[in-house]
Amino acid sequence: MNRRKFIKETSVTSAGILYLPNLFNSGRKEDTILGHNNKRYRLNKEWSQLDATRYPVKDCHEMVQDSKGRIILLTNETHNNVIFYDKKGKLIKTWGHEYPGAHGLTLFNENGHEVLFICDNNRHQVIKTTLDGKVLMVLDYPKETGKYEKAEEYIPTETAIAANGDIYVADGYGKDFVTQYDYKGRYIRHFGGRGDKDENLLNAHGICIDHRQMGDPTLVVTSRQQNAFKRYTMDGVYLSTIPLPGAWVCRPVINGDYLYSAVLQSNAHQNEQSGFVTILDKDFKVVSNLAGSDPTYSGDKPEEMHQTIKAFQYPHDVCIDDDQNMYVCQWNSGHVYPYKLEPVS
C-alpha cells in the first residue's frame, strides 16, 4: 500500500467516521470508528454472544452497569426481561417474565444494596426490585396529582433517584409530568406537563440528576419532540433549556464530565432509521455525534443535527462502563442485541 492510498483510506471524513484497515490480517474487516474530537469509538456490532432462540429480545430499551461490573439490559421480551452480561458480551443470568412494557431501567445504591427501578408502559407502573428480581415496591399511577383519572393515562418511561431516596418519575408517553415521591413512595409534588411555556415538556422520555455544576444538583429532563433537554431544580423549578436541533434525544446519561444520549431519530429523516448518539460536555455543548453530523454551532445553538452513517437504526439508550466503553441498545431495530463501542485515543 503506497503512502497516498494509506492516507486516503485512514482519513477522517466530515461525517465523523474512520475506517482503519488491519494491515496484518487481510481477512479481518476494517474497523469502524465513529464520533468527533476526543470522543471517538470503535464499533463492535457482534458484542452480544447470545443465542436468540434461547434468549430473545424485542426492543432493547435501556442498560446500566452494577458495582460488580455486570452490564444489565432491559427488554420488553417476557421470555427474559432482564439480561445480565459480562463486559465481553457473555451471558451471566436472566430473569423476568412479568414486564410486557419494560422501558425504563435505573440502578440505585440504597444503603449499600443496589436496587433497580423498572418503568413498565403496559402496566402503567414503576416497580422497584432487587438485582435478582424480587419486588420491593410498586408505584401506581399518581392520582394524588389530580391530573390523572385512570391508570391508562399514565405511561412512565424513566426514573431518577436522589441521594436521599426521593424518586422522580417521568411520564414520557402519558401527560409529560414529572412526579416526585419520597423513598417510601409517598407523593411530594409534580411539575412539567404539556403546554407552551418554558417549564412544560413534550415527550418527557428521560430524566437524570446532574451533579457536575457548582452548587446544588439539578434535574435534566428530556423534551424529545422539542429536540431539547430541560433543567430544573430538585424541587421542580424550571431553570433552562438545552436546544439540540433535529435530535430526538432519549434519556440523558451522565458519566464523569459528559452527558451521553441516544438519539432515536432526526427531524431530517423522521419515521426512518436515522438515529445516532450525541455527547455533550459539562457546559452542555455538543462535542461529538456518533454516526451523526459534525457538532457545529451557529452562535450559542447547535446547527441542525442528523444521521450521516447507517451504523444504528433507532438507538434508545447508552451505558458507559467503568472502562469508558459504551453500549448502545436499540428500539424497533430487528430485535438486535446491543452494540459495544470502545474509546479510541
Image (cartoon, rainbow, N blue to C red):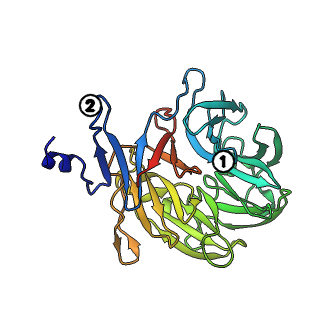
Nearest the camera: 311 or 320? 320
The residue located at (36%, 54%) in the rendering is 292
Side of 203 where 115 appears, left or right: right
Q: Which of marks 2 and 1 is in front?
A: 2
Residue 324 in the image: state x and y as whole percent.
53, 52
The residue located at (70%, 50%) in the rendering is 107
Disc 1 target residue: 105
Disc 2 target residue: 26
Residue 77 in the image: state x and y as whole percent.
62, 32
Between the C-alphas of marks 2 and 1, the distance is 41 Å
Of the residues shown, which amino acid type is indicated by label 1?
A: Leu
Residue 336 in the image: state x and y as whole percent.
49, 34
Of the residues shown, which amino acid type is indicated by label 2?
A: Ser
Image quadrant in which you'd find residue 160: bottom right
For the residue labelled by badge 1, is the local secondary structure a helix, a strand or a loop? strand
Note whether 84 is above or below 167 in the view shown.
above
Residue 110: in sight, yes or no?
yes
Q: Do the residues labelled 2 and 1 touch (CB within 8 Å)?
A: no
For the residue labelled by badge 2, is the local secondary structure a helix, a strand or a loop? loop
Nearest the camera: 201 or 244? 244
Image quadrant in which you'd find residue 189: bottom right
Nearest the camera: 170 or 318? 318
Residue 146: in sight, yes or no?
no
Checking the image for residue 116, the label placed there is none
The C terminus lies in which quarter of the figure? bottom left
Note whether 293 is above or below 296 in the view shown.
above
Residue 232 in the image: state x and y as whole percent.
64, 72
